[in-house]
Image (cartoon, coloured by chain):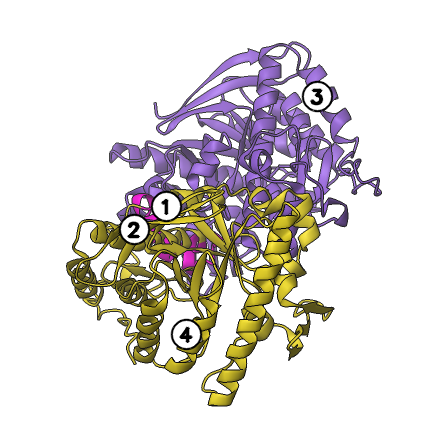
Chain colours: A yellow, B purple
Amino acid sequence: MALTFTLDALDSDTRARAGRLWTPHGEVLTPAFMPVGTQGAVKTLAPDELAAAGADILLANTYHLLLRPGVETVRQMEGLHRFMSWSGAILTDSGGFQVLSLAELRKVTDRGVEFRSHLDGSRHFIAPEDAIWIQDGLDTDIAMSFDELIELPASIETVRRSVDRTLDWAARGWVERERLRQEGRGTMGLFGINQGGVEAAERARCFDTLGTLAFDGFALGGLWVGESRSLSLEMVERDCARFPADRPRYLMGVGHPVDVIDAVGLGVDMFDCVLPTRNARRGTVFIATGRLVVKNAAYARDPRPLDPECDCYTCRRFTRAYLRHLFMSGELLGMRLASIHAVTQMIQLARRARRAVIEGGFRAFRAAFLDKFRSGETLTRSGVTTAPIPNPEN
Amino acid sequence: MALTFTLDALDSDTRARAGRLWTPHGEVLTPAFMPVGTQGAVKTLAPDELAAAGADILLANTYHLLLRPGVETVRQMEGLHRFMSWSGAILTDSGGFQVLSLAELRKVTDRGVEFRSHLDGSRHFIAPEDAIWIQDGLDTDIAMSFDELIELPASIETVRRSVDRTLDWAARGWVERERLRQEGRGTMGLFGINQGGVEAAERARCFDTLGTLAFDGFALGGLWVGESRSLSLEMVERDCARFPADRPRYLMGVGHPVDVIDAVGLGVDMFDCVLPTRNARRGTVFIATGRLVVKNAAYARDPRPLDPECDCYTCRRFTRAYLRHLFMSGELLGMRLASIHAVTQMIQLARRARRAVIEGGFRAFRAAFLDKFRSGETLTRSGVTTAPIPNPEN
């Protein structure tokens, strides 16, 4: 098998799990946070920096790579790993999300999605089968089923129709991978995506069918897209209760530290999100004590690292004063150094959660993490009012 | 002494020299190319990358750092080396060039220069003495005299007046460093700058006085600012013939590979220029065979590194196809990887020139370098017409 998943430990108090996923490009320790390399690069960062941050898996976006540089170019460059010079594992999304959020003039039918590129207006069509061979052409380690996302709130009829279509597309994608395997290709793993918005019954119905296909893992789709956080967490809890224990569970697009820790406690194994790196490029990072806005005048002569508890390259080598200077001066190095910290912070948070599970203390770990994270003590030295504290609850 | 210079070898055929400059932050091998860290960072690059590129000295801009983050901030952060996390040597310019090219509403008198910041319009005044203690406050290894640049062409009267003023300011700066030394500061080296535009007699007159002050090195100022290249090279030849053999010679602002090699042949030891990194950020790099425009469609599926003869991080790890993709996609990583190559290429070119001098074959080295550099064979694989070949002669 291309992909195998083993569980190292189950937390006794919560549903948290510690596992490892074996891929053709090495082992992925879970819970895992996957940095996002949208266009074949995690913005501003080189592969060595990602490895140094502890990354063993990256996410890349099929839609973006399909449009530019194109699958054939990546294939001729011997696949995405070689192209990016990244020797770890890669998970690709199916392109469904971007097609439905970025592409223009899109038309969704049972056959697939017709759309125009947001780059040059060129016309494209992706059938669920296409999404699979495209991901295979990129040489991914883990492919995702092509699914239909809907905007929330949506009528129950809309949700039902999207579940039906998602199930049909998942099955067709699954068959396509079988076909590829008969041709000696398709060694990649394939994850199914559960949909149904925040309709518990629809998500359950979706999984009743999805779960009959022997996917290598299951993703929780359509959450954290505008609905309330508590409802999302309820869906996570329900989905995880239905998903088989021996397959990895991937909560798509979730990346706030508090959300990640809460979802780990409900049994999720994998996460991805552009939030940490996007924030970092804008000069905001998460540290152990909350959120830090690098440009804050309070840091102008602050000799401390961004996060005194972090041992990333940025925190080992540079002061807040220097980081602030770089951002104030528009130096791209600032974005880079903040991104290094942001990626490290998320990967190491997941890694610490893993250790807590193995050592049997996830609940205490979570409580201590939240306590410190919400303390907001990022400006204590200067005595200036504290930075806004993240409050994801709503 | 803070700064000592020793000569390892003199070329028998040309005026080329191989030396080493001992600074409080390590040894600088000459000929040396100094990457420019304008605002306390070589754009897009981290200090480790500069060290890996072979850099033993960087240049930083006094004018920029004076305005932002300010000398007092750098001093509180324990100097520029600590602030930037750069353990090698640093040379600072005096700020004169930027004051006269960037600042607004500037007014030059014998006392100094009054100007408004190009950032916020704030009013500042720099006397030649100020330029020295500011550079000392930045904790530089090599400070430059505050000089007056003029735009060329200029009347002989204008040139004369600027030479007179430059000499007066150089002497006042020299005295200021002596004063700092009596206070236990001012351990930095100090270079005098020879001016006089392309008036050979004025440059000679300038040096007749400048050379009586025991500067730690001498710079060739006011060249490559619009006048013809052959005339500039003639001034370089004349200046170098007058400069004492036992002090390093620094040709300011010159960074085209062909110019650097020609000036080395005339006896210059040190160079700086933003050209290689500025070009790189725009997707143009120099390689052994000339200039390469990364976005050229011919490289879309080119599996070769930017420069097959280069062993920088970029050329060891990434293809032209990937670099082109990054530039086409607007990924900042492209700027970074191109900058790594550009900086490495210039530093290693100077290093190879040094080895040629030591091995007694600079003339042959120069001929082989020019031959290959002008071949322009950057697109041979695809058969597309060659990229524009640099022709600095005019």
Q: CA distance from mark 3 to mark 1?
A: 45 Å
Residue located beneath label 1 in the image: A54
Q: Secondary structure at mark 1?
A: loop
Q: CA distance from mark 4 to mark 3?
A: 64 Å
Residue contact between numbered discs 2 and 4, judged by CB atoms under 8 Å: no
Q: CA distance from mark 1 to mark 4?
A: 27 Å
Residue located beneath label 2 in the image: A351
**Residue A223, numbered label:** 4
Closer to the camera: disc 3 or disc 1?
1
Task: State which region is magenta.
Answer: A312-335
Mark 1 vs 4, N-terminal side:
1
Q: CA distance from mark 2 to mark 3?
A: 54 Å
Q: Are marks 4 and 3 on the same chain?
A: no
Closer to the camera: disc 2 or disc 1?
2
Quadrant position of the C terminus of chain B in the picture: top right
Number of marks: 4
Q: Are marks 3 and 1 on the same chain?
A: no
Q: Are marks 1 and 4 on the same chain?
A: yes
Mark 2 residue type: Arg
In terms of depth relative to the viewer, which is nearer, A296 or B211? A296
Q: What's the residue at 64%, 40% (across, down)? A: B319
Magenta region, mostly helix, strand or loop?
Answer: helix
In terms of depth relative to the viewer, which is nearer, A234 or A110? A110
Mark 2 vs 1, N-terminal side:
1
